[in-house]
Amino acid sequence: MLKKYAKLIGIIIMLVMMVVSVAGCGGNTAAKTIKIGVVGPESGGAAQLGQGQRKAIQLAVDEINAKKGAGEYKLEVFFEDDEGNPTKSASATNKLIQQSKVNIIIGAIHSSATLADMVVTGRAGIPQITAGSTGSSITEQGNKWLFRTAVNDEFQANALIKYAKEVKGIAKIATFTAADDYGQSGAKLLAAAAKKQGVELVANPTYNNGDKDFKPQLLTIKEQGAQAIFMWGLYTDAALIAKQSRQLGVNVQLFGASGMAALKLIELGGDAVQGLILTQTFLPDSKDAKVKEFVTKYKAKYQENPIPHAAQAYDTVYIIAAAVKKANSTKPEDLRTALTKTAGLKLVTGEPKFSNRGDDIGKYLLITTIKGPNFELIKTVNTAN
Amino acid sequence: MDIYRLAGRKFNIILLAIVLLLPLFISNLYYLHIINLAGIYTLITLGLNLLSGYTGQVSMGQAAYFAIGTYVSALLMIHFQISFWLAVPAAILAAGVFGALIGIPAMKLSGPYLVLATVGFGEITRLVILNWTAVTKGAAGLTAIPLPTFLSIKITSEQDFYYLIIAIVFVGTYIAYRLAHSKIGRTFSAIREDELAAEAMGVPVNMYKIAAFVISAMYAGMAGSLFGVFAGVASPDNFTFDDSVAFLCMSVVGGNRSIAGAIIGTFLLTVLSEALRTFQAYRLVIYGGILIFTVIYMPQGIYGMAPIFNKWIERQPFAKLLFWQKPSRE
Amino acid sequence: MQYFLNGLPIGAIYAVVALSYSLIYTSSGVLNWSQGDMVMLGAYIGFTLTQVFHWSFTPALLASMVVVGLVGVIVQRLILKPLRERKAPPINVVIATLGVAIITRNIALAIWGPDAQVFPSPVGDKPLQLSMISVTHQDILVVCVGILVMAILQYFLKYTKEGKALRAVAQDRRAAVLMGVDTQKSDAVAFAASAALGASAGILVAPIFFVTFNMGAGIGLKGFVAAVIGGLGSIPGSIAGGFFLGTLESLAGGQISSGYRDAITFALLILVLWLKPSGLFITKSRQKV
């Protein structure tokens, strides 16, 4: 009996090896190219983020190659879908490094996926820049290969609570956050920021991904007498929370963070999200010349407005191009050193500059509100302060 | 029939050599990574086959035991600096205890009720991991899970992990094989075929059912502790309902009434879901189509096709090459 | 009181989905895991008809039920029938329907994209404020239409030829065959009817929850839980299970812990399964299948 098994297994292993040896023959490295690997969710619940990221990166790569923006190097880009799942994300990163032989990784978007990818890039010694993960734990790992061009949630939480207290005179708040990596990190940071600035946190309910009925939690918040609700989640959830809170007659000020910053929030939320205050890194109808240029090009190519994730990913490619030009090398260690010395760029979402932990501290943080069908800028905060 | 005998010992030795030397041929570490991942999943599927194929029970919550294995061993290693080799038995034990816990209500259930009970258990486990942030770090998950060492050799590279995983899978397969062909395995099959008859013959059916759950949970727990050190991080997103479903599909597609089926199904579906990456948007549609096709046209899984496949192989001219000798007449 | 009221509309949705599970299960013995995705498909078709082609609500509801019902028949013909002819083990049937769910979900993603879509309520979602309690028009509509759909199903089962055949097959498949009932046809009817039920649930829930390609997974699983808690295969049981689950979730989420809400639901489910596998609301004992 055992031999019967052995034969079949043997044949399968042989087949696998044949496939492997055939597939292994592809892939040759042309001189003077820098290969960028991109990991992000292009299917699954956060597909719109990954697809926005892909479109913006493709746009930036084409532009840079057209005007020789990376010195003598030509950029080549490889995309892999991770479905927002950490195991698949690590496999995708492995594929990019081992098979596509990329020199640098952009990704992922989910913090849990980015953390799993960091193990792979850390072991392989390849620089990784996440343009989408905002969770504070990412830059607390002490991983020297990791950089972040998304705004650390900590900055956002502090700026929001400060604004609520000083401008709106709010003293009692509630947080209402998703029970995922994004929301849990936000809840922790909001609580810390509230404590620091002497604002009372009266309720902190959470919801699980896929929940659609938020009324029980909203009733609890109402009973505790909060003057404002700070949401930390994706725009679909935020729009539903806003709608249901209005239906229950909970008419308090709503706050949110960059994760829900999409025009779709206004479309879905309708009247209920009017006046909502949120921090973000990018406004498509900003007067800024860089932003205007980016939005025009993006719209011309894809017939839609870019999401903030797209703007951050677009900038990330420019940061890489500048680093490649400076390093004049594709060696990981040289690229990393060049990235740490990033300076003097003026991009769509800020003037990038990395801290010791790898956080981009040159980002503009925009405090905005929803008015009519658009976001309106209240004020710009520089994250360096 | 004769072919198996003819293949003989030589074949096994060659097979073993291939398995041991495989990392030398594969320079692309990505392939080795996928093989390693499939190796870890094989342990889960082995347990699942003992549970579903042999005993006739179902579990759509196997990711829960996988998660328990990962978290128990990783937490022990992180907080108490316990060696990997002690953390594994602890993880297996913990998973086994939970296996018994769900095995008890499952004794009374069958069909959709059993499916739902195991789905429910899987969801409860995931939600507890997600919300018990003080211990599990919630959704952000555990990071910096220490690497295992073997006799002062630190296991770091994909090759190192390949040998570690292959060794454990080998032991796991051997145990599963012995179990399946022991009195216990035959009793499992008797329960699957006719529970009432088994009961009438004086078989303590409930005990055996719980044992099947415990064994399958232990396999998943073992896989979990390997996965933790292999991935280096663990978060609830690794242990969702979709993962449980994927494990079940591996078991059924490979053929859940055999040990070899577990290995075939796991490797095939793991490699398939990676290979389909090129198809991007339609990847999952194709995956779903393949699932449906297999369960309709190969009801006993791919391994169930083995007799047909063997006949076909015997007729091929290269059969001689593969098995060294011409198949003689019986 | 507010918590209880909030649970009613969602309970009505669960009840309709639970019914769709029960209907297929009793009549053909199949656990159809793609039921939730029929809900999603119904919502998207309703969305397309009302938003893109500007149909009004009622014809869109009916058309969507018909289209999704046809999808149900296709699933039965292409997948269930060959499985049955080959006497496949039940677990294979479950996996085949899981395959259907995966395919449906990803085709929807390809057609309608990853973004959530707004499906405006036909009656507006302004709240009615009654002292301490507030209810929206949409909530009332959901409960009313939900009850109406369940009543129509009852009528269909009791007074039409197809419905009677379905009940006969549910009672005793072999005997029904001997009596000349075409079981393939009755299976097709069951699949069509339960897919259409799912579609109606989808359209009802869409204005409250938006339309997304992965909305089916959650609603489908909850509907199944409701069916089992109430008593899988029993129509009044499924309805009671749906409303029970809706209000339980509302109370558990508000009063105990929002993070553990679903964990509480599932723990209760396992307890029910352990102590009273035939369902909470079924008095006479039925044989387990």
Image (cartoon, helix red, strand yellow):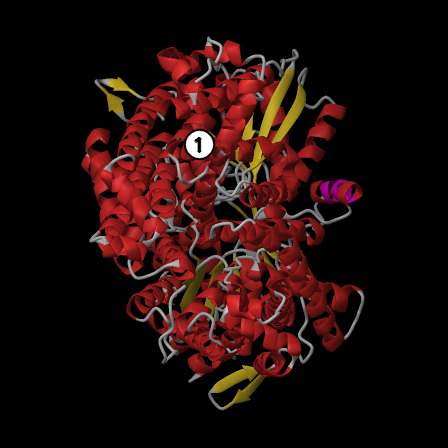
| Residue toward you, A275 or C208 | C208
Which residue is denoted by mark 1 in the rendering? Answer: A118
Residue A295 x/y as whole percent: 73, 44
Quadrant in the rendering for residue A294: top right
Please, is residue B230 above or below residue A383 in the view? above
Residue C281 x/y as whole percent: 39, 78
Quadrant in the rendering for residue B112: bottom left
Mark 1 lies on a secondary structure that is helix
| Residue toward you, C89 or C155 | C89
Question: Residue A159 in magenta?
Answer: no
Residue B294 x/y as whole percent: 56, 41
Q: Residue at x 25, y 23 (%)?
A: B149
Does residue B36 appear left or right of residue B89 in this picture? right
Q: Residue at x 47, y 62 (%)?
A: A230
Does residue A246 appear left or right of residue B184 in this picture? right
Amino acid type at image mark 1? Met
Identify the main secondary structure in magenta.
helix
Direction bottom: furthest residue: C131
| Residue toward you, C91 or C40 | C91
Query: Which span of residues is magenta-colored?
Result: A293-299
Residue B285 visible in the shown view = yes
Residue A347 visible in the shown view = no
Q: Residue at x 26, y 17 (%)?
A: B153
Please, is residue B8 above or below residue A368 in the view? above
Label 1 marks a residue whose chain is A
Residue B238 x/y as whole percent: 42, 43
| Residue toward you, C183 or C188 | C183
